Image: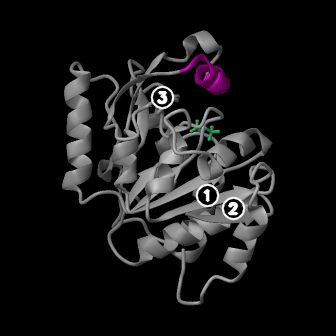
Amino acid sequence: MEIVIEQDADAVARTVADIVEKAVRSGPTTLGLATGSTPLGSYNELIRRHREEGLSFAQARAFLLDEYVGLPAAHPESYHSVIRRDFVGQVDLDPAAVRGPNGEAADIAAEARAYDAAIGAAGGVDVQFLGIGTDGHVGFNEPMSSLASRTRVKTLTEQTRIDNARFFDDVAQVPHHVLTQGLGTISEARHLILIGLGAGKAAAIAAAVEGPLAAMCPASVLQLHPHVTVVVDEAAASGLSHADYYRYAIANKPAWQSF
Ligand code: PGA
């Protein structure tokens, strides 16, 4: 795990975009896209590079992390709609090459299995965006999720529903259930980028990076992964006890080693 502490959200977005741009320019790339507020700056920077610098996503494909169960795909807050609005619809990524879990499937268990199989058939995810919940979730793997879990239905905690109520008229409209890639599924992506912004994420980032490996903090499963880049602003880094060491390691990164 490498920890990159940037001064602010704009610098975080540039660092994340640099990683994604390098992958996309190297050839056909499968991206793992996340919704929520955290990746928006990075998406906007990639959109800018697409418009101003010719960065093309025409050869890329993408899988989403999760979806609400029972919310129609056409609902403005379905993750299907959100990712089109926030990213896919603003670059030259073929919408047909972007897949998310189908939260309206009649047989949700079969859809979950099919989703994992589709990621495998595509050769796996090359670069996976991840935000983190205030309770340490990644995707919608709430605390006590199996660290080996596959795509499946999860029940959202009340805290997550409250956190996401800002996207709906009120908290009662936030669905209780989601279909989410499991922690085992996510862990199969070749490069994980965990982004944390703001003081509200400081405790979760500290638990994920420095806390024990524990299902109580689902993001701690990233400690087992061979290639994770955690990109945080100063506020989200404020709970880290070894921040000075992380800065030192990045400042002295060997020239041959890149993110
Ligand atoms: P946020 O959500 O990016 O909107 O803060 C992150 C998450 O819940 O995983």
Residue 10 x %, y %: 74, 61
User: Label 3 is placed on what type of residue?
Assistant: Met
Mark 3 against mark 1, which lies toward the viewer?
A: 3
- Choose the circle earlier in sequence order: 3 or 1: 1
- Choose the circle earlier in sequence order: 2 or 1: 2
Mark 3 against mark 2, which lies toward the viewer?
A: 3
User: Label 1 is placed on what type of residue?
Assistant: Ser
The structure residue drawn at horizontal position 45% and vertical position 55%, both measured from the top left corner, is 224
Colour scheme of this structure image? one colour
Q: Which residue is mark 2?
A: 12
Q: Secondary structure at mark 1?
A: helix
Main SS category, magenta section: helix
Q: Secondary structure at mark 3?
A: loop
Q: Quadrant of ligand 1?
A: top right
The structure residue drawn at horizontal position 36% and vertical position 63%, both measured from the top left corner, is 60
- The answer to if 163 sits in the magenta stretch is yes
- Choose the circle earlier in sequence order: 3 or 2: 2
- The answer to if 78 sits in the magenta stretch is no
User: Label 2 is placed on what type of residue?
Assistant: Val
What distance separates the C-alpha of mark 2 from that of mark 1? 8 Å
Q: How many marks?
A: 3
Residue 144, label in figure:
3
In the image, 185 versus 240, the foreground residue is 240
Q: Name the quadrant of the N terminus.
A: bottom right
Left or right: where does residue 53 sit relative to residue 180?
right
Answer with the quarter of the image where residue 14 lies: bottom right
Q: Which residue is mark 1?
A: 42
What distance separates the C-alpha of mark 3 from that of mark 2? 29 Å
Left or right: where does residue 156 sit relative to residue 195?
left
Question: Magenta region: which residues?
Answer: 157-166
Left or right: where does residue 113 sit relative to residue 66?
left
Residue 171 x %, y %: 63, 14
